[in-house]
Amino acid sequence: MTQNEKAEIAEINSRIEDNDDPRDCYQLVREKIRTHEQKGEMIPEDLRRLERTLFAECNAASQGR
């Protein structure tokens, strides 16, 4: 993982910690992934992992868990 990718993940994690709504956090991660895709860049695995985790949290929240 490059230094730029590490900084991006750190910034995302910081914003997630400040936000209690997993839907907002998921949207933020999806926007970052879309940006990478539009540039034709590889998606960092940590970003994909974060996306999966937040997706699961959104599903659990929608089901009242």
Image (cartoon, rainbow, N blue to C red):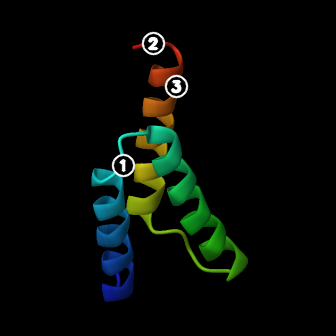
Q: To which quarter of the image does residue 41 belong?
A: bottom right
Residue pointed to by mark 2: 64
Q: Amino acid at mark 2?
A: Gly
Q: Residue at x 34, y 71 (%)?
A: 11
- Mark 3 or mark 1: whose residue is earlier in sequence: 1
Label of residue 9 in the image: none
Asked if the residue under mark 1 is in contact with the one under mark 2, i.e. CB atoms within 8 Å, the reply is: no
Total marks shown come to: 3
The kind of secondary structure element at disc 2 is loop
Where 55 sits versus 28, above or below? above
Left or right: residue 8 versus residue 52 is: left
Residue pointed to by mark 1: 19
Please state, as top left, top right, bottom left or bottom right, where the N terminus lies in the image: bottom left
Label of residue 59 in the image: 3
Whole-percent x and y of residue 38?
Answer: 72, 76
Residue most extreme to the bottom: 3
